[in-house]
Image (cartoon, rainbow, N blue to C red):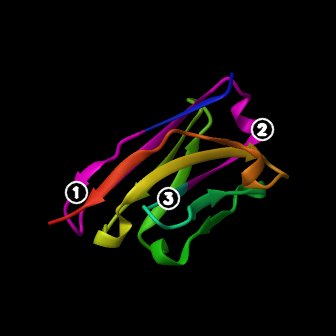
Amino acid sequence: QVQLVESGGGLVQPGGSLRLSCVASGMIYTRYAVGWYRQVPGKQREVVARIIKGGGTIYGDSVKGRFAITRDNRVDTHYLHMNNLKVEDTAVYYCNAHEWTKDPSTGFWGQGTQVTVSS
């Protein structure tokens, strides 16, 4: 059974940093592209960062230059490094994994981890 488990969320002040982790199980991890998405109440889920075929990365416009996505295939885990956090980054963050040539909507999702940025 495929499972993605996020961790690392919490409360942080504006300008601070967090690292989110997503541990995958029940899959051959290297066969999957991975990403992070976020959602706030009343709004649609939006892409934050993705690692796509060939190892390239895609970032949402609002996080470019502040966030970075990485993966460690040795431990079936991908990360979201979040720097210079802003109040508007507050959301539930979800990790995703999907087959390399497929759309993220065809893949798997974690349960989410709350990130709250507040002074």
Give the residue number, with chain letter if any, for mark 2: 31
| Residue 108: % across, % down | 67, 40
Question: What is the magenta range?
Answer: 7-36
Determine the secondary structure under disc 2. Answer: helix
Report if residue 33 is visible in the image. yes
Q: CA distance from mark 3 to mark 1?
A: 16 Å
Give the residue number, with chain letter if any, for mark 1: 12
The image quadrant where one finds the N terminus is: top right
- In the image, 52 versus 110, the foreground residue is 110
Examine the rendered structure and indicate whether residue 2 appears above or below residue 81. above
Q: Quick one: which residue is furthest to the front in this view?
A: 42
Give the residue number, with chain letter if any, for mark 3: 38
Examine the rendered structure and indicate whether residue 75 appears above or below residue 108. above
Determine the secondary structure under disc 3. Answer: strand
Determine the secondary structure under disc 1. Answer: strand
Which residue shows up at 47% across the image and 76% down it?
Answer: 62
Which residue shows up at 34% across the image and 64% down it?
Answer: 83
Q: Quadrant of residue 72?
A: top right
Instruction: Kindly identify the amino acid type of the residue bearing the numbered disc 1.
Output: Val
- Numbered-mark total: 3
Instruction: Kindly identify the amino acid type of the residue bearing the numbered disc 2.
Output: Arg
